[in-house]
Amino acid sequence: PSVIHKPLIGAAWEENDKTLSTYTARVRIEDLPGDALLRAAPGIFQAQVKKQFEVRAQFFGASCFALKIDSTRIEYGEMDWRLHQNGDMTDGSVTLPDAVYQACLKQLASLGLVAGAFDFIVTPDDEWIYLEVNEAGQFIFVEQWCPELTLFDAFCSFVESGDPNFVYTAPAEPQTLDALQQAADPERICAEDEARRSPPADAAPDVTPDAEKTTACAA
C-alpha cells in the first residue's frame, strides 16, 4: 500500500511569492533523507487508508461530540482535509459505534486525560480506523460547521464541573458560539451603548463641562 507522512509540527515558509505549508503527503522510500535527518524531524508514517469519510470526535469527560467530514468532496481530500477548512464537507453529526466510544474512554483513562480530540477514518467497508488523539485539539470549528453540536456550552459546563467523568446535559437554551460572537462584536456594542446614552432630540442641552464627560467605549 501507499505510505503517507504527517509532520508532528506544521511549518510554513515563503517561496516564489507563495506561502507554503506542510500537510499530510504521500512518500516513497526514495524521497526520504538519511536516518540522522529523519530523527531531527519526527513525524507520523502510516499506510494510506481508503476513505468513505472521516470523523473528528471531541470528548469532554464521558461526553462525545462527533462530526462527519466527507473529505472525498474536496481536492486532495484523500490526503488531508485540513487544506479546505470550511463546512462544505460535512453532513452533520455522527454517532460513534459503542465499541469505538468505549475504546476512546479507555484510552483517555490510560493516558491520564479528561478531554481529547479523536480522529478516525471510516473505510468503504464501514471499518473505523483510529488515527490519533490530541489532548489540545481544535474543537471550535466543529460547532461552526455543525451548530447542533453545542461544544462551547459543553466545554464551559465541563470546566465548571471539574468532573473527569462529565456527562453533558444540554439546557433548554445552551450558550452558543454564534451568540458569543454576536455579543462580543465591539462595534455593535459601542454603537448600541452610544445610542442608549444619547439624549432624545427634544431633551434640554447638556451643559456638563467637557472635562467631566466620559466615553463608554474609550480605549
Image: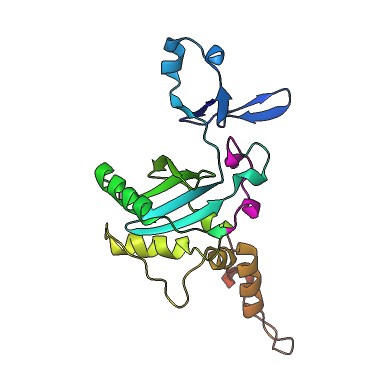
The residue shown at (67%, 83%) is: 199
Q: Is residue 157 above or below residue 43?
A: below
Q: Is residue 176 magenta?
A: no
Residue 94 percent across, percent down from the top left: 49, 58
Q: Is residue 74 left or right of residue 29?
A: right
**Is 77 or 47 nearer to us in this picture?**
47
- Identified at 63% across, 51% down, the residue is 89
Q: Is residue 86 magenta?
A: yes
Q: Which residues are magenta?
A: 78-91
Viewer-proximal residue among 100 and 156: 100
Callout count: 0
> Where, quadrant-wise, is the C terminus in this rendering?
bottom right
Q: Position of residue 149 (x, y in %)?
A: 49, 63
Name above or below for residue 81 compared with residue 61: above
* Residue at the image point whose x is 55% and y is 37% from the top: 50
Q: Is residue 12 above or below residue 94?
A: above
When asked about the image quadrant of residue 81, the answer is top right
Which quarter of the picture shows residue 107? top left
> Quick one: 92 or 41, which is closer to the camera?
92
Q: Residue 25: which quarter of the image? A: top right
In percent of width and height, residue 201 lies at 74, 86
Q: Residue furthest front?
A: 125
> Which residue does the image show at 55% across and 64% down from the upper left?
147
Q: Position of residue 129 (x, y in %)?
A: 44, 41
Q: How is the image coloured?
A: rainbow
In this rendering, position of residue 183 left or right of residue 116:
right
